[in-house]
Image (spheres, coloured by chain):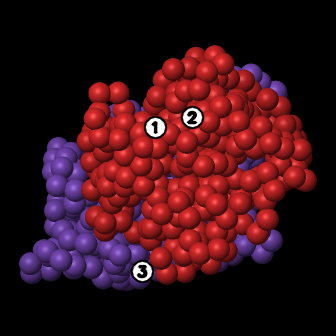
Chain colours: A red, B purple
Amino acid sequence: MTDAGSKVIINRKRPGMILLLIDRSYSMEDTVRNDGRTLAQMVADAVNETLYNLCLLCIHEEHEGPRPYFRVGLIGYGMSATADVQAVEPALGGMLAGKEVVTSTELALNPIRVVERNGGADFDGEMISVPEWLEPVAGYATPMCEAIYRAGSLAADFCANHPDSYPPIVINLTDGVVTDEPYAPTGDQHPAGLDEWAERLTTLRTNHGPLRFLNAFVSATPLDASWFPSTPNGLPEPGRRLFDISSPLPEDLATAAADKGKPIGAGARALIVNASPHELAAFLEIGTLDVLNGAEYGG
Amino acid sequence: MSGLIEPQVFVTAKPGERPESCQDVAWFDPAVAGGPVAGFAVADGATGGWDGRRWAELVVDAAADAIAEAGGAIDGRWVRAELADALDRARETWRLESPSSEPTTDPVAALARAKFKTSGGQCTLTAGVLWAGTEGSWHLRAFAVGDSPLVHLRPSDDGYRVLLAAPQHRADQFDTHPTLISSKPPGPGAVVPGLSAIAIDDLAVGDAVLVMTDAIAAWALHRDEVIGDPWGVLVGLDHAGFGALIDRTRTTDEMAADDVLLLRMTIAAQPYRALPTVGPLTTPTQPIGPGGGR
């Protein structure tokens, strides 16, 4: 399951890291066909659900509260959440505004709101209270390179400080084409394109293997989603570029995907193209909770 | 009755954890319901669920009650009757202790309720009885769910040899998804899913019976397979030695950084004397030996 060949342990000393890159470009205002939500709202809902489930993984007793099993970062790129400008910025709001990475404890304690909703079958149809962390935002262009660069900085720090942890999981949620390449951070004289920034990102690793870089292309007119494609041929734009930058599917992720009934071919990449709202939620679940399901938690 | 069961419980929490957070729980009663049968139980609460320690306490309590109700006579009928009823009562207690279901703006309360409802509690259980036979040997009957195995040891020329290890007898049989007793009611017809029965009829003076939670059991079985007899070390442990063993094997990554519990029951040759009960609710700030009370 891992390069180290040993059991994955997630605890306070060996936390996991999850970074979500959230496209906030203008086109995220488009309304999803047969759904009624904007793409930005669809992504925010899926991200909120993922964060909620991550927090559930981390809580074992009410008086103790959630444990810091994870480092979590949300990076928005496109419209700023606080001003009418383009920005690449931390996307958590409320008490966590401006923080690039927080522990799962900080995350759980500081949602932007707690909403009531029907809990479904698990709760016998009762209403439940559910925290939310992310607001939908849309506007301006798609500075994806800078977002990947920022993710790389955070992930590099994490890998250096937690070499025995499960490798960082970075998931890019986008509906568009990169608009900021070639990109060079301030003070850097060597601009690079999307592929190079992604390559730099995916060379990061812990003793348990390379960073996992997943990409989800969402569409306002989702048709025939391509799950974990093995070839870029036939993918709608920008599918080919997203294919190229996505991690080859590691064994544990392939297992998690297969367990959810997603056929995995040779050379499959950590990518979904044309995800509907339901499929986006499932993709995030496979890429985070399912892939970490075999880990041993505690301590 | 000849001989004496000398029980010792060694327990410690995960590294860096508060002792009271330890989710491994044990019980031993040298005279169940004042009779000639000794009872024991070990449970290992699952970290991934809700309040694994509390559920492990309730399940060990349930096993102790069920053994007492049957006067120490446990068999398949006991599983379906006394044990099943006692586990149902444990589930009801668990339900009554549930987090509030009122609407809340407190995110921790919201998460607590959801985790309680969706995950519940899970734990292993290995519970049984020991008694002296008229022919001089001792007998054991036990039932086990999950990966807290029981090991029967006999002294040999070069240490101890394993006469029985069950349900697990190899180190590679431990994984992170053992069958567990859940706070959620089992499905129709599945009174206690995944139950293994253990019977020993040739326990002799000098033998030891160990019941171990997964970390130390996996360590011991692996060492037995690869290096050689770990059993003499475990049979000879005192509390200081237990602490040193755990520290050393965790440092070298030989033992998983998990809660650890070892219940050791030795058939000794001394004349019978009354021993106090080891209770499941004893907070393991120190290794538990004979003492405390249920």
- Whether tag 2 and tag 1 are in contact, CB under 8 A, the answer is yes
- Residue at figure coordinates x 26%, y 42% from the top left: A160
Asked if A10 appears above or below A110 in the picture, the reply is below
- Residue at figure coordinates x 64%, y 69% from the top left: A235
- Whether tag 2 and tag 3 are in contact, CB under 8 A, the answer is no
Dot 1: chain letter:
A
Q: Is the residue marked by circle 1 packed among few (<14), some (14-19), or many (20+) residues within 10 Å?
A: many
Residue tagged 3: B200
- Give the CA separation, mark 2 to mark 3: 67 Å
- Residue at figure coordinates x 45%, y 67% from the top left: A248
Q: Is the residue marked by circle 3 packed among few (<14), some (14-19), or many (20+) residues within 10 Å?
A: some
* Picture quadrant where residue B215 is located: bottom left
Residue tagged 2: A77
Q: Is residue A263 left or right of residue B157?
A: right
* Picture quadrant where residue B30 is located: bottom left
Query: Quarter of the image containing the C terminus of chain A?
Result: top left
In this orientation, does residue B115 appear?
no
- Return the disc, 2 or 1, that comes first in the chain's sequence: 2
- Residue at figure coordinates x 67%, y 49% from the top left: A175
Q: Is the residue marked by circle 2 packed among few (<14), some (14-19), or many (20+) residues within 10 Å?
A: many
Residue tagged 1: A146
In this orientation, does residue A82 appear?
yes
